[in-house]
Image (spheres, rainbow, N blue to C red):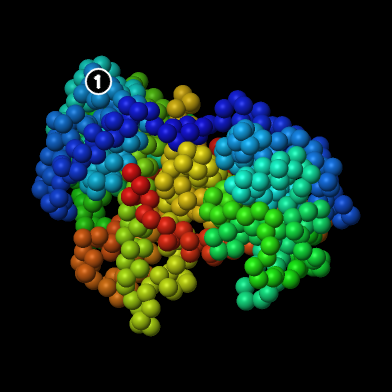
Amino acid sequence: MDFELDDEQRAFTQTASDFLRKHLPGRGPDRVPMQPDRAVLAACAQLGWFGLGVPDAAGGAGASPVEEALLFRELGRALTPGPFLPTLLGARVAVAADDLELAGRIMDGAVIVALAQPVPHRPELRLFDFENADLVLLVEHTSALLLERPPARRLVCLDESTQLGSAVRVANPAAVAASSSEAIMDLGMVLLAATLTGIAEATRDSAVAYLSIREQFGRPLGSFQALKHRAADMATEVEAALSLTTYAALSLAEGHPGARLYCLSARALAHRAALANARANIQLHGAIGTTFEHDAHFAVKRVHILGEQLEPVKVTLRRLVDEPSPLGDH
Amino acid sequence: MDLRFPSDTEIFREEIRTWLRANVPRDPRPDEGTEMLEWDLNWQRRQYEAGYAGIAWPVAYGGRGLSLVQQLVWYEEYARAGGPYLGACFVGLSHAGPTLIARASDAQKEFHLPRILAGVDAWCQGFSEPGAGSDLASLRTAAVVDGDELVVTGQKIWTSYAQVARWQELLVRTDSSGSKHQGITWVICDMSTPGIEVRPIRNLNGVDHYCEVFYDEVRIPLTQVVGQLHDGWSVAMSTLGFERGTAFLQAQTELSRTVERLIEIARTRRGFDGRRLLDDDSTLDQLATLRTEVAAMRAMTYAGVSRAGRQPVPGPEGSMTKLYLGELTQRVSRCAMDILGIDSLEVDGSFVRDSWVRRYLLGYEATMGGGTSEVQRNIIADRVLGLPR
């Protein structure tokens, strides 16, 4: 039983975070984090990101959900927008569908996959970060489908750094590749949790840094107990989310029979943690936290985006209550 | 990184699971008095005789000498089997004993440790005072050296089991000339010494649990001092966080049992509208969230034990787990009260075996004992985050 990163994992995390700092997030007008273009996505593919957990035999890097979670934690920390999650999951769908040719093209960055999300009771899809994508990943009932990217109309999105699109949802769409949704969703839950954990960490760090330098009443803000306690709660949210996400990734990697409950729990809990910390970060920055100029709002907005991806958090909560008891798994 | 336990640990798990299933007491634990003491000591004795006392304690003093991870597994299986609260044995096993292991003389260890493990003596803790709660180091119970004895005069409060314990880990002020952390001495006090008076305090759940303890020129031999005279603060701090948080897994497993039972009940019980409680969105949200939080508590315990295996001294991160556990314990109890509805008004009502109403009341202590939630937040802010003082 060991929760510490080994040297290889440490080096991998460092490489990922260095790459993101160097190439992403580029900032556009008004400091809005920019979507990665095809060249950057191809560079990410060269680093092996989209086939990280695909077995060597199928052309991937043969890593486990633990390394994949480390990558998404860094993406969350840097608040990187882009079709990383659906492209990685798309490669998995292709492998599961035995379409190794397609899997190979996704893994080397030639095919990019965006996320498509159904809208309840309306024949519509919402597409995320879709403008550079060739395919979309749609999880419906028990299937994960890769579809040709439908024509879409760009919507004004809550999060300025996310591309939100609206497309028509057709019945029984023709899939380019399809697999069962179970493994895709389990992994997706862990990677959403990891992204959210990264956001919870980054917002904690941002708040702590500000509390340490900003002075009022002749003292640093961080010396006031009321503010210390809010920061302590932010640290505790991170500790819970990070530990649970690690636990979930490990139990998935090791194929534990009760892994699904931990994957679902990690997504739901990390979502709450990230939202709590992102909100607290705005409050602890005072009025400056409510301006567009400060980064704090991007974290809150991104958490709302992530809360609707793959499945709404409400559905995750319903599913996790229906899982068997964790006490029966030994 | 991995979650797997070594194969000898899994063999150990099977062994203790079988033993616990057959041996965990099923008769109700008396609430108070010598009946309760005998019940607690008797259960401890049975574990000792079977070789399951002090899993990670040194073999020389009657322990098993096993690893932290095996200790963790013990707590998990203990709770899973429905093992009782350690009760009157808690302070000896979880605090005084570990302090003695870390800092006592060979003679002190040889005498006391086997007696704690074998369920011969119960211990209590004399730390807090009416004027020294969260600010423990400001304690004022005075001890004067007179020949080869300390003469103690003063008052302690919030001492659990003082009425029944044979020994007390006692913090006294032997020097008040320096800073408040200096001049404190950690001493073993025999509770049968003349001059000690114990007055129980009735808890909000109607049970006598905590006590006030008064000392009127109580004479304690200097040989009972643990560590050096005036160096008691460092002795007391050496075991905060002892067992490196492995005991959190017992608490976690108990919370998990409760939440699972609540989910089971919410699946079948119906409200006034005829719907199952679990079909109510707010109940569903509450129970699902508790399930995620109990899972997080488990993961935090694992992460803490893993961290402890690499740190020579426990770090301040344990305060986050402690804070989380205290708050979560209360949320679980409150949810139980919600689910019981009007049945929660009857202390020994239809769910008497789960003792949820009693546990709800007891839960108010979960954010006090061992340092309040607010003190934990101070520690996290200052020592984990490094915020300015």
User: Would residue B282 appear left or right of A299 to someone viewing this image?
Assistant: left
Q: Residue at x 57, y 37 (%)?
A: A64
Whether residue B310 is situated above or below residue A99 in the rendered picture? above
The reply to whether residue A235 is visible in this rendering is: yes
What x and y, as percent, mark residue A242? 55, 44
User: How far from the left and from the top, in percent, is residue B384?
Assistant: 56, 38
- Asked if residue B118 lies left or right of residue B140, the reply is left
Q: Which image quarter: residue B52?
A: top left
Along the line of sight, the residue nearer the viewer: B274 or B342: B274
| Residue type, mark 1 in image | Val
Q: Quadrant of the C terminus of chain B?
A: top right
- Image side of residue A263 versus residue A39, left or right: left
**Chain under numbered label 1:** B
Q: Is residue A213 above or below residue B101?
A: below
Q: Horizontal and vertical percent for residue B271?
A: 35, 78
Front position in the image: B17 or B120: B17
Viewer-proximal residue, B228 or B349?
A: B349
Q: Judge left or right: residue A51 versus residue A318.
A: right
Q: Is residue A201 visible?
A: no
The number of callouts visible is 1
Q: Residue furthest right?
A: A29
Residue topped by disc 1: B59
Label 1 sits on a secondary structure element that is: helix
Q: Identify the residue at image location x=38%, y=78%.
A: B275
Q: Residue at x 64, y 57 (%)?
A: A145
The residue under the point 83% across, 46% down is A38
